[in-house]
Image (spheres, rainbow, N blue to C red):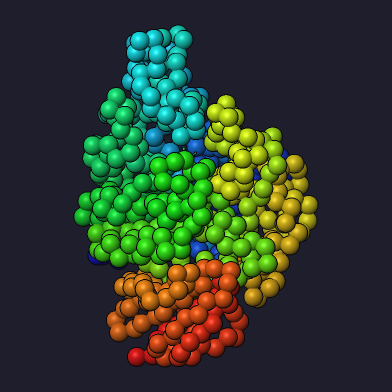
Amino acid sequence: MKKKWWQESVIYQVYPRSFQDSDGDGIGDLQGIISRLDYLQNLGIDAIWLSPVYKSPNDDNGYDISDYEDIMDEFGTMADMDELIQKAKEKNIKIIMDLVLNHTSDEHAWFIEAKKGKDNAYRDYYIWRDPVDGEVPNDLKSTFSGSAWQYDEDSKQYFLHLFSKKQPDLNWENPKVREAIHSMINFWIDKGVGGFRLDVIDLIGKMPDQKIKENGPKLHEYLHDMNQATFGRGDLVTVGETWGATPEIAKLYSDPKRDELSMVFQFEHISLDQEDGKEKWDLKPLAISDLKRVLSKWQVSLGDEGWNSLFWNNHDVPRIVSRWGNDQELRVESAKAFAILLHLMKGTPYIYQGEEIGMTNCPVTSIDEVEDIEAVNMYHERIEAGYSPAEIIASINAKGRDNARTPMQWDETANGGFTTGTPWLHVNPNYRTINVADSLADSNSIFYTYKKLIALRKAHPIIVWGDYELLTNTADEVFAYTRHYQGEKWLVVVNLSDKEQSFELTENVHEIVIQNKQDKEYQNGQIILEPFEAFAAIIEN
Ligand code: GLC
């Protein structure tokens, strides 16, 4: 495999709405991000994945785009965007744009035209069907609750929306749609961006009449053509959000020989606390054995035929330290443990804003405090289905997307230094003790564990390229693995429980490269691991 820059990189995701407000309107913006580039450079990341900043009515916080070639009013102007790309470049940070290609906003000019009638030139940019027996065409469901079909009174037809009814699905069968999208992608490449994250890209080959959503028959043809018409001409990174990908499917996307995408961003490990065959809101406890099995499968099965992302967090999932760690008395230990476990694996790591300081979930007590459309719609659907409000709020507190979207906690001033105005979403009250300023001042903070992990990746090719092997003769709660590369061997040991565990260290430690129990020494023999203890060692050869 020819080595690529993005295989050796660490990517930081910014959710602009919640990162840094510069003008006091309570909403994060591009100038706010620019003002924090020094901080990101200090952390050591190579690229920023920017959640959507395009013009949008914000039904789904920018994932409903009304103009792909313009900037959301609240975020600033195209001049701000150019400035961000330029200033980031000066710090060797690339900007990765979030491409939402499965759907637009219903306020996009294409949809406004399409709605004008069956003869409109843009009608076929979207997916319209006649009623069947006076009802919806079929029982396809929207991810945001209810039917995926919305009736249009004027034309007496339904249009498809796999997300909200303000996010009509584009018709990828139409070559004009594909060309328009390609030209838009080229617009951004010409601006000098470093790559793209492709939102729910597994859906663009859908066949609604057959009720096929993911992995439709033409999906890979569309992606190959897109690659050839756009990003394939440059050294850009592309990461596909592919919820249900298996390793075999991941190879279709990311085998370099196929000229589609650089890597997948798949969710198998992060869905392991969901009841089988049910919705994300239906929880079951995580079995560490499942986590070991799934992460290890992805470590070994791609070989030279694909590339994977490494992540615990993004703007759609709850905070890992609250979810599978301990966000109370073991917050620092568990946050570091999860970081060490993931960042010494093979793949491109992603850090979601605030993860590097151990930001936590932010529980609510009533649906009035919830902003996220997914949770709000689900709440109403489940109330109608007879669930109690308390039950639903418990699911939202465990899995709701607002958990990850509360404003970034910069310091202990009002609103955590995020805004001088009224924040669009409540700031987690723990900002007084969990914030960037304190993290930077404490050489033992979670921040410096992340910084060190990034630096280690740059200094040691074994982290990027080494073979991976899971150690199977350990306690269930101990996740231990080795990496091997050109005669070198590393051992990573993480206790993923809040109890002591014993671990048999069978080899001689040459050097401890990182640990979350300061100054603890590790020698051959039986070790008692404290709750969430983690270390990585170079093994003597
Ligand atoms: C992706 C995004 C999510 C959005 C959805 C629809 O899953 O990450 O935030 O709501 O697609 O665009």
Q: Position of residue 26 (x, y in %)?
A: 70, 42
Q: Position of residue 435 (x, y in %)?
A: 69, 61
The residue at the point 57 percent across, 37 percent down is 375
Residue 16 visible, this orientation: no
Residue 27 visible, this orientation: yes
Q: Quadrant of the N terminus?
A: bottom left
The residue at the point 35 percent across, 18 percent down is 137
Q: Nearer the viewer, residue 438 or 383?
A: 383
Q: Residue furthest left?
A: 257
The residue at the point 29 percent across, 55 percent down is 247
Vertical placement of residue 88 versus 426, above or below: below
* Residue 489, quarter of picture: bottom left
Q: How many marks?
A: 0
Left or right of 401, for residue 541: left
Left or right of 177, for residue 52: right
Q: Quadrant of the C terminus?
A: bottom left
Q: Nearer the viewer, residue 267 or 7?
A: 267
Q: Position of residue 521 (x, y in %)?
A: 54, 88
Q: Position of residue 297 (x, y in %)?
A: 33, 62
Left or right of 230, for residue 41: right
